[in-house]
Image (cartoon, rainbow, N blue to C red):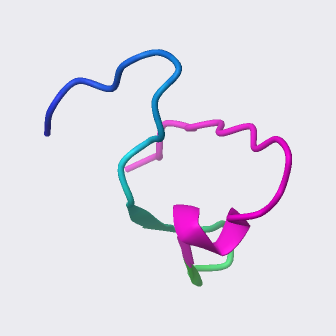
């Protein structure tokens, strides 16, 4: 994956949320601010 630059739109991606439902970055389009927090999973 290419490096993300400051002041540029983030690339589209999807990840499962805590309940297992897929959430995409585009689901939050047209919102003023989006804060992403990545938690390391437990194995």
Asked whether, in this view, residue 42 is left or right of residue 30, the answer is: left
* Image location of residue 2, percent across then percent down: 15, 32
Type of secondary structure dominating the magenta stretch: loop
Residue at the image point whose x is 77% and y is 63% from the top: 30
Quick one: 15 or 1, which is closer to the camera?
1
Q: Is residue 17 left or right of residue 3?
A: right
Callout count: 0
19 relative position to 14: left or right: right
Residue at point 75% right, 44% down?
34
Queried whether the magenta region covers residue 30, the answer comes back as yes
Start and end of the magenta stretch?
23-43
Residue pictured at 57% horizontal, 38% vertical? 39
Residue at 56 percent across and 69 percent down: it is 26
> Is 10 displayed left or right of 36 in the figure?
left
Q: Quadrant of residue 10?
A: top left
Identify the residue at the far bottom of this view.
Answer: 21
Position of residue 15 measured from the top left corner of the image (x, y, whole percent): 45, 65
Say if the magenta span includes residue 26: yes
Q: Which residue is farthest right?
A: 32
> Is 24 drawn above or below residue 36 in the view shown?
below
User: Where, by quadrant of the figure, is residue 19 drawn?
Assistant: bottom right
2 relative to 17, above or below:
above
* Residue 17 location (% of width, % of height): 62, 68
Which residue is outermost to the top? 6
**Residue 40 in the image, given as x and y percentages of width and height:** 48, 37
> Split into 4 quadrants, where in the image is the N terminus?
top left
């Amino acid at each position: 994956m290419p490096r993300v630059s400051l002041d540029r739109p983030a690339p589209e991606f999807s990840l499962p949320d805590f309940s297992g439902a897929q959430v995409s970055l585009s689901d939050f389009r047209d919102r003023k601010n989006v804060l992403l927090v990545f938690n390391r999973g437990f194995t």
